[in-house]
Structures are given as structure tokens and as C-alpha cells.
Image: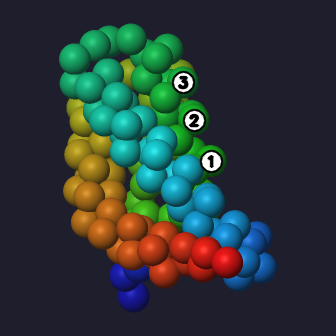
Amino acid sequence: METPLLDLGYLQEISQNDNTYMYEVITLFLDTVPKSLETLDQLIRETNDFESIQRRAHSLKSSSNVIKVRGMFDNVARIDLLAREKTGKEEMLERISSTLVNFNEALPLIKAERKKNKPMKK
């Protein structure tokens, strides 16, 4: 059975299905992760700055463990490790490309979840 493209199970668990909390976490995710992925992609493609690659990948691990997009956590964790070892640029390129494909496919679903959890105005 294939891993779902988007898994919010952990977020639902820690939020105890509190819509406001889920809305805020998803909003924070959408405000930070797309730019971070873009920066990581650029660092991998255009530099050999393994320290910056490692820092960016490391920072993405926690976000990708709360809102789970297929393969994202494993890919950024592996990029983090490779960058620490200062090796594996080809593998990093493959992993960031795969991550971006899945992330861009999941983006409308993430936005729909945010909209679904938007708190009602009182």
C-alpha cells in the first residue's frame, strides 16, 4: 500500500482535533516551508555550501514530521546527513526534486485543510 500523499494524523493527535490549533500550525507551515524548500533546492543546485544545506535541511525535518508529505521527512533527513558528511550532491538533487514534486502536489490539499480548519468569527 502506497504512503498517502498527505498525512495529518500526528497534527490531529497533538492538537486533539482543535481546529484553531490545526489552522495555526498549517498556516505557519505554509508561511515557512515553501520558501525553505525553495532555498534548499537553490543551495543544493547552485552551491557546495554543505553547512548551509545541512542547516536548512535540518530545520525542515521538524516541520515535515508534523505535517507529513510523502517522502519529505526521509528526504530532508537524508540530505541533512549527506551535507554533514559533505558528500552526495547527486543524491541530494534527486531527493530535493522528489520532495518538490510531492510537496507541490500536496500543496492544494494542505491549503484545503487549512481552510477547513479556519476558526469561525464570533
Vertical placement of residue 52 versus 77, above or below: above
* Residue beneath disc 1: 62
Estimate the x, y position of residue 31 in percent, counting from the top left: 46, 46
> Answer yes or no: do the residues labelled 2 and 3 have beta carbons within 8 Å?
yes
Cα distance in 3D space between marks 1 and 3: 12 Å
The residue positioned 45% from the left and 52% from the top of the image is: 30
Estimate the x, y position of residue 1 in percent, counting from the top left: 39, 88
* Residue beneath disc 3: 55
Which numbered circle lies on residue 36? none
Cα distance in 3D space between marks 2 and 3: 6 Å
Vertical placement of residue 97 versus 42, above or below: below
Horizontal placement of 42 versus 56: left or right?
Answer: left
The part of the image, by quadrant, that contains residue 12 is: bottom right
The part of the image, by quadrant, that contains residue 18 is: bottom right
> Looking at numbered disc 3 in the image, what kind of residue is underneath it?
Arg
The residue positioned 62% from the left and 47% from the top of the image is: 62
Which numbered circle lies on residue 59? 2
> Looking at numbered disc 2 in the image, what kind of residue is underneath it?
Ser
Colouring: rainbow
Q: Secondary structure at mark 3?
A: helix
Mark 2, residues whose alpha carbon is within 10 Å: few (<14), some, or many (≥20)? some
> Answer yes or no: do the residues labelled 1 and 2 have beta carbons within 8 Å?
yes
Mark 1 or mark 3: whose residue is earlier in sequence: 3
Estimate the x, y position of residue 24 in percent, counting from the top left: 62, 60
> Looking at numbered disc 1 in the image, what kind of residue is underneath it?
Ser
Cα distance in 3D space between marks 1 and 2: 6 Å
> Answer yes or no: do the residues labelled 1 and 3 have beta carbons within 8 Å?
no
Vertical placement of residue 119 versus 91, above or below: below
